[in-house]
Image (spheres, rainbow, N blue to C red):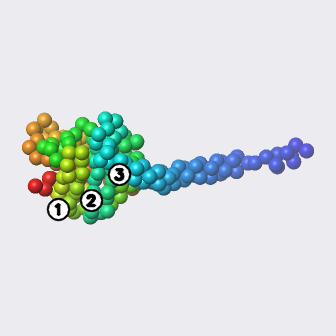
Amino acid sequence: MSSARRACRPSVFTVVVIGIVALVLVLGAAAAWQVWGTTGSAHTRASRALTSFPASCDSQATDAVIGVLTIDAIGVHEPIARGTDNKALGSGVGWYTTTGQPGQAGNFALAGYRITHGAPLERLLELNRGDVITVDSCSGSFRYAVEVAPRDLSVHADDSWVLDAVPGHAGQIPTEPVLTITANQDLVPTADRSVLFATLVH
């Protein structure tokens, strides 16, 4: 009788295999949500945010849309949110609030995802020197030309010099408007960031 009960009990190997399969399924579902689930909801939020601009210019809300980023060469037309936290980046691109204003002397810096959360900058690495980027803000419309293509410059996520008023020259007083865009370099999570620099077209 006891031997029959032992025969019905699953072996340690079977339990381990079932556990591994369950873990793989859970991780796969989480990865699928990150890639496809967040993208659908991000597109919905981005569409609403675009509709709310420029009416949001009159709003004092901290989550108001501050502008629209358009890059015709790669099909980008995205709202610019205040900040670079997950909420801001979940509805378009985000503005580093410690950096300058569009069209003004200094560094107007933006961030966005190349995969997940709507992947607004999915094709960023296709940009070339001279490609035009338009920023429509509450204070006007500004055109920038790419000076440093994002595929030519990668930095570590902690390299904050790209956010300096004059990138790479901390403390220097800016005299020209610069646009910086950062995005994850790889399609899997790493600390590498692709960086684009553009200058105002006068």
Res. 184 in view: no
Numbered circle sitting on residue 130: 1
Residue at point 20% right, 49% down? 140
Which amino acid lies under the numbered mark 2 shown in the image of this protein? Answer: Ile
Which element is circle 3 on? Answer: helix
Residue 51 coordinates in the image, percent (x, y): 36, 51
Q: Residue at x 13, y 43 (%)?
A: 105
Q: Which of marks 1 and 3 is nearer the N terminus?
A: 3
From the viewer's side, name the closer residue of 170 and 8.
Answer: 170
Q: Where is residue 112 in the image (x, y as percent from the top left)?
A: 33, 49
Q: Nearer the viewer, mark 1 or mark 3?
A: 3
Residue 142 higher or lower than 105, as above or below: below
Kindly report the distance in space between the C-alpha atoms of the residues bearing marks 3 and 2. 15 Å
Q: How crowded is mark 1: few (under 14 residues within 10 Å), some or many (20 or more)?
A: some
- Residue 21 visible in rendering: yes
Give the image location of residue 82, x and y in percent: 31, 41
Residue 4 is marked as none
Q: What type is the residue that disc 1 sits on?
A: Gly
**Location of residue 55 by image quarter:** top left
Pointer 3 and pointer 2: residues touching (CB < 8 Å)?
A: no
Which quadrant of the figure contains the C terminus? bottom left
Which is nearer the N-term, disc 2 or disc 1?
A: 2
**Quick one: 8 or 169, which is closer to the camera?**
169
Q: In which quarter of the image is the N terminus?
A: top right
What residue is pinned by disc 3? Answer: 50
Q: On the image, numbered disc 2 is attached to which residue?
A: 71
Give residue 113's position: percent from left, percent from top: 36, 51
Look at 18% across and 44% down and name the residue there. 107
Amino acid on which the number 3 mark rests in the picture: Leu
